[in-house]
Amino acid sequence: MEFYRLKNNPGAVNVSDIPVLEYDAFTEQTLTLLKKREHHAVDYFTTCTGNKLRFFILIAGDDTHTIYLYSHVQDRNVKVLNSLTAHHYPMHVFEREIFEEHGILFVGHPWLKPLRYPNERADRNAAMSNYPFYTIESEELHEVGVGPVHAGVIEPGHFRFICHGENVLHLEIQLGYQHRGLSGLFASSRNMLHRALLAESIAGDSAIGHVLAFSQAAEALCSFIPPSTLQTERIVALEMERIAVHIGDTAALCGDVGYQLGQAACEALRTIVINTMQDWCGNRFGKGLIRPGGTNFPLSADIAGHIMEKLDEVRKRFGNAADLVYNNTGILSRFENTGTVSLAQARHLGAVGVSARASGLKRDVRASHPFQAYTEMKYSPPALDTGDVLARGYMRKLEADISFMVIMKLLDTFRESGSDISPKPDYLMKFKPETLSVSLTEGWRGEISHCIITDETGEVLAARLKDPSIHNWTMLALAVRGAEISDFPLCNKSFNLSYCGHDL
Amino acid sequence: MLNELKVLSDHGRQYISDLRNKPVSERFRGRPVISGEITSNEIKEVSAMCPAMAIDSRCGAIDLGKCLFCNECALMLPQRISFTNDYRISANRREDLIVRPGQTSQIRPGEVYIRKEVRHLFSKALKLREVSAAGDNSCEMELTAAGNVNFDMGRFGIEFVASPRHADGVVITGPVSENMAEALKMTYDAIPDPKIIILVGTDAISGGLFAGSRALNRKFIDEHTVDLYVPGNPAHPLTFINGVLDLLGI
């Protein structure tokens, strides 16, 4: 096996230390590594220099807490490669992306379709309006198109159902409406603060998860180790984001089945969490709080006390509300066995995050590749095994409970130790030249990864931002297979995937 | 039953009775105040630093239609620039979002620029169709929150509806991507006349960080008259609600 083994998260490696394999050897090694259940592909992407394309792959070893890195190089005008997806399905989004951007045909790929119609696509004739939907010829079947504009105040995406009566035989999801060219702007940015603001906009509901991933990737490029107070602040913020969204999603699930008490109570509890975030940093979504090298909003004993007091109240009240929700037979009858994704399916699709854990797939960066204050904790992720809306909903309760505990523990330590004040952000940090950094965080949806590659002067040559949603959209499509189409909103809400995070 | 009562009593009264004057946290960043004493060198320095290019390099004015409220300018020049927690910063003219050095006056939609039919037809009920056109989902979540148990804008007859056919106007979030341009136009066209346009969030108002991106198509925004600009990153529910109430004269 030829790979570079990255042992830290975040970690950095000399680009020249990343092995370049022949494509056949690359394929063989990738498929061998991915056969192991504890391994999964974090990312697979290309960078372009001169007339060469370099393809980097990152494979996470969950049991060994490492990331395996290696690559292959092709001429820029390469037109055909054998598909990895044909043998390992989770690679499908990455190969679709490369196909769309560079026009490379992956032979054996079962579903080589456009992914997000980026502005810089190889085939300018490919247009949102002529997406090649899968169809079935039959007089008994009909198609239902939903979106891009949906009934609620949510992001745009198009869902095409093939139905037999009320039952869904197949759902195909067309995305791309949210493409803003963010990745391109990020890679060409020459300003650290500007990059941080872009990272906060990748997905507004995961602003903290993403800007933390970016800050880590930047810090790894100049060997900055965050002091322990800064690590505490970052994890408290990340877990507050998780609590807010998990409670908000519980409210939305209640709303989708018409249970108003649960919806109203949880909406109000989410408000307390995000208003507490606003008391800390002036923004309900935590924008502005996390920055490379430091923070503009260091914790004080007062703020730590305020957060603990508010969150303790929310914890108790959410516990009561969740008891009510998950003991209500009407709700259980709607949540149970709805939108089921089995463990085998989740594994086959390469699912990540809270949705994967609801199906029994215990993949969690906090445990497998601990970062910041998690390096000092033995985090053990909870999991359920039914993989239905009930499991995805109840996971929110289980995870929020753990987040409360983590925050209380960190803030207790902070208050007792009379910790130092965190440094100010450093927007002028100098990156090591010709280095690739990898940073993972566990956002509330799942595994976020950011990579930054520098050139010989230490400027950013390429950057790669990945939102966990990209792994999980196919899970939603499978969840509604065989279900009644009227269950779709509930299933969609139980995953709550990011459209803009996918369409970078 | 007892559990229900427990949750209800914990829940208490969430409703904010006075949405016009509800105090928000001191650290919330709303309307900025720029000292009239700011020097031309300071202006040059701070405008070059601003990652959103929201500060005029000649006069030092901050354009809230471009500002991301990141607070870095106030940290750079704490004696000259500060962000107050005044969240009532919606306006109906683009130029009214520009805050000049020495300006301490509040920002309000200008009465004379409000079309007559808007108040005549919509002041008792305003139904809106929201279109997220490459928004990052933070403004969208704040707009949803504007209707929740805390902010409850429904009390004024203001709410979001599913069908553009039932709507009196469109609320746009996001910088408007090329891939969403047609759907936005179709949604707007499906709304019966007369109708209003509200832009929510910095991305929608100016394109924000994405203003230079080739993946955008802001033709729709450029070609239509906007009735209300609601700045923020994301816009606070109180900024949105107060802006709409001012527009409707409630």
Image (cartoon, helix red, strand yellow):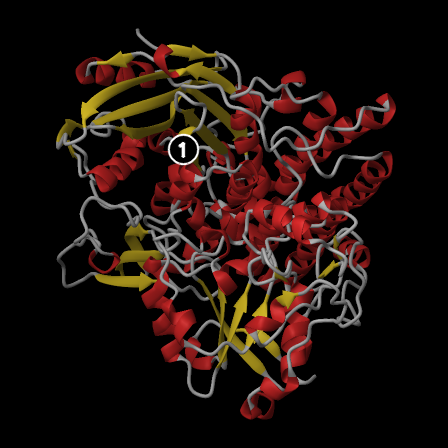
- Residue A279 x/y as whole percent: 77, 48
Work out whether B234 lies above or below A420: below
Q: Residue B238, position in %: x, y?
A: 69, 66
Q: To which quarter of the image does residue A473 belong?
A: top left
Percent of width and height locating residue B176: 41, 61
Q: Amino acid at mark 1?
A: Arg
State the residue at coordinates (39%, 75%).
B223
Quarter of the figure that contains the N terminus of chain B: bottom right
Which residue is drawn at the image coordinates 51% and 49% (left, top)? A335
Among the 4 quarters of the image, the one containing residue B56: bottom right
Q: Is residue B68 above or below residue A432?
A: below
**Residue A341 visible to the viewer:** no
* Frontmost residue, B143 versus A314: B143
Does residue A414 appear left or right of residue A222 in this picture? Answer: right
Q: Residues within 10 Å of mark 1 (few under 14, many from 20)?
A: many
Residue A67 lies left or right of residue A315; in this view the side is: left
Residue under label 1? A464
> What is the tally of numbered marks visible in this picture?
1
**Label 1 SS:** strand
Tell me, yes or no, if residue A430 can be seen here: yes
**In this image, B182 relative to A420: left or right?**
left
Label 1 chain ID:
A
Percent coordinates x, y for residue A446 in the rendering: 50, 35
Name the residue nearer the viewer: A354 or A319: A354
